């Protein structure tokens, strides 16, 4: 099955109070442009900081089902967002491989055992998914917490993973990097090692996302956060090919027979949109450098024809401007996508998001202004 | 004058032993693909580190005519590079504005007086170029040192500046940044202040580059190192428009009546190449994310028609691979540009370069392998 058109599956989403996000993923018309925000459960929220203080650390939140549920729901209680996203980290999979993930306060992630030579690469294996049970438990718990009195879900829950290449960056560098020197040295010097690592990563990510789907994730997203640092040619060979390997293994339907949309986001990948149009996914995420009209023309598709929904792409720094300017920039992004699809079949759709995770310095009341502007202006566009 | 075709000017370059770089800038055929490397005079060279130890600091090198000359020539003495580039920093102009530039050891640049409010923006003025005399002295000194026994120059000397937007990033942030939060907050909150700062920056950069041309720079390059962090729309308004303002003020001919090619490099700007095709410059620099064949088709132009020469774009991390792999990647980049122009008029040309500055960790002998591969493979392509 190579088409991503889920004609034979349940795409009615009657089990949700607010199905707009899933509808837009499948290029169905919605009464307004749905939105969620990358890293929407995060440090900019005082209630998140309080939860984190109780849990003691980031991983203390992520590995505890109750805390993960609590912080996942926090932004939904503040803002009328159209999707929830699992609170977790993109590096749980290499941690389960035994690399020893830690987060020092105020710093990024670190691995105690980075993968830097042939012997270390040879030892890599798809981890036992039982080691990631805390993630699947969190998914089930969040789904339960999202279920309303009428038995329906409030909004859908998105599961996610880092892409094989993005995981490899951290696995080799051992931490964040500003030049990716170590991972690219391996890529250019020993492409055989890099391909082996990426194969293990892809199969691990596929198993991980499938287990999230089994636990109740209603859409899945692959974060190729570092695909954009690769050279043209290397991106296609070392990042996109392994994202495709993940997609080929993913379940297409959930436990209740519902279709599970698949989202791929390559930060800095705007130049390769035409290549990514061939990926077997439903949605492509875009950062703020991409012109939405151009992306729609390239990969958005036509009425009742194939195409990708587009997700993005406002610069998160817009949220530091006063509310009036936020509304202006929101309008600009919505308008750049062009006329919303309003037919009864499938057509070009837009899911509003930031082009990157929200900054910890964001004033929470500015997020309210953003959400309100997206919903109100996108409703106007449909009149 | 809006055309960049310098028909009435001296484009023979008889005053140079090796004019290949300037010829390629003007889309003239050359016997091989000329190359130079961004940051070619730098810390990866032991002789540079020795000079810097003598000078005491980076700015100690840059502000001393003799040291600046010494380190500018060092890479040319090791490798048969086809151009020299002034040893200096992109932040000399805001330093001359009184912002107080310093470089702490092992850290990036810092400004003592960042520009963060209306009062600070109001105070900005085009600096007295006398404060930058050390730069113009270095240019004259390097030109003299490049002059050979036959009175001709060994290779041409490139002058440069940061772009108005890139200068503004540092001026507001006060240092490097990974999110550009402060400068983007000003951009989105107070676009009027940002436009005023960019106007002063553009007029300053134009005066600065013109003085470099007067002192002997034979080509000039505008480094828009941070243009790529802007959103689509914002790039055109806040970066490209001010690069255009610089270009409009630049001298087109040097003291000897020779044409001065103009290069614009926006790191991360590959998505905006079509916009940048309208810039009144001769060469567009490209980072490694750009496909050279696609760029050539978009902006490289046709035989005897308008178009830009292209400069770039190998990933500097390729230099960490063994020499055989370096040669393979060089071949891939040269081949991706396609058939070299070999006519007697003007046509699509390529200047080989890295897609970013060379890393301080690069083994110097790997650079020799790169230079050799570029020259030998590009000669073969012309047979």
Image (cartoon, coloured by chain):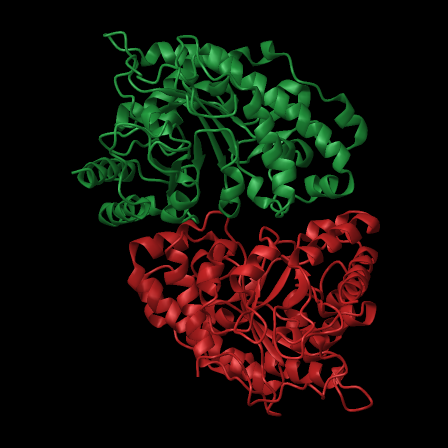
Chain colours: A red, B green
Residue at point 76% right, 86% down?
A: A147
Q: Is residue A40 above or below residue B14?
A: below
Residue at point 38% right, 30% down?
A: B40
Q: Is residue B276 above or below residue B128?
A: below
Give the image location of residue A8, x and y in percent: 55, 90
Residue at point 43% right, 10% down?
A: B140
Give the image location of residue B142, x and y in percent: 39, 14
Q: Does residue B323 appear in this view?
A: yes
Give the image location of residue A100, x and y in percent: 50, 67
Give the image location of residue A53, x and y in percent: 75, 65
Figure quadrant of residue A78: bottom right
Closer-to-camera residue (B362/A38): A38
Residue at point 29% right, 43% down?
A: B334
Q: Is residue B360 above or below residue A233?
A: above
Residue B196 as seen in the image, left or right of residue B355? right
Quarter occupied by the C terminus of chain B: top left
Residue B91 as seen in the image, left or right of residue B113? left
Closer-to-camera residue (B371/B273): B273
């Amino acid at each position: 099955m190579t088409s991503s058109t889920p004609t034979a599956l349940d795409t009615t989403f009657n089990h949700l109070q607010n199905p707009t996000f899933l509808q837009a993923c499948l290029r169905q018309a919605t009464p307004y442009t749905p939105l969620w925000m990358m890293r929407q459960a995060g440090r900019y929220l005082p209630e998140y900081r309080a939860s984190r203080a109780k849990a003691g650390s980031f991983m203390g939140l992520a590995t505890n089902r109750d805390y993960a549920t609590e912080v996942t729901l926090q932004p939904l209680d503040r803002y009328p967002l159209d999707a929830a996203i699992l609170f977790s980290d993109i590096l749980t999979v290499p941690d389960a491989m035994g690399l020893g993930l830690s987060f020092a306060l105020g710093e990024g992630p670190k691995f105690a055992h980075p993968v830097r030579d042939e012997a270390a690469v040879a030892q890599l294996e798809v981890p036992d998914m039982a080691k990631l049970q805390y993630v699947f438990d969190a998914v089930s718990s969040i789904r339960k917490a999202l279920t309303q009195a009428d038995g329906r879900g409030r909004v859908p829950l998105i599961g996610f993973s880092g892409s094989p290449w993005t995981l490899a960056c951290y696995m080799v560098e051992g931490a964040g990097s500003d030049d990716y020197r170590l991972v690219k040295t391996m890529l250019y010097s020993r492409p055989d090692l890099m391909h082996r690592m990426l194969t293990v990563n892809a199969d691990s990510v596929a198993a991980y996302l499938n287990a999230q789907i089994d636990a109740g994730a209603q859409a899945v997203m692959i974060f190729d956060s570092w695909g954009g640092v690769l050279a043209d040619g290397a991106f296609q060979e070392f990042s996109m090919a392994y994202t495709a390997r993940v997609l080929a293994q993913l379940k297409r339907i959930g436990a209740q027979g519902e279709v599970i949309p698949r989202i791929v986001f390559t930060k800095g990948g705007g130049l390769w949109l035409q290549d990514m149009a061939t990926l077997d996914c439903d949605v492509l995420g875009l950062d703020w450098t991409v012109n939405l009209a151009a992306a729609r023309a390239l990969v958005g598709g036509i009425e009742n024809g194939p195409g990708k929904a587009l997700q993005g792409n406002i610069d998160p720094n817009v949220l530091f401007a006063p509310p009036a300017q936020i509304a202006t920039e929101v309008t600009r992004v919505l308008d750049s996508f062009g006329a919303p699809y309003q037919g009864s079949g499938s057509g070009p759709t837009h899911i509003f998001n930031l082009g990157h995770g929200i900054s910890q310095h964001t004033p929470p009341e500015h997020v309210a202004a953003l959400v309100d502007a997206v919903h109100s202006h996108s409703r106007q566009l449909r009149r």
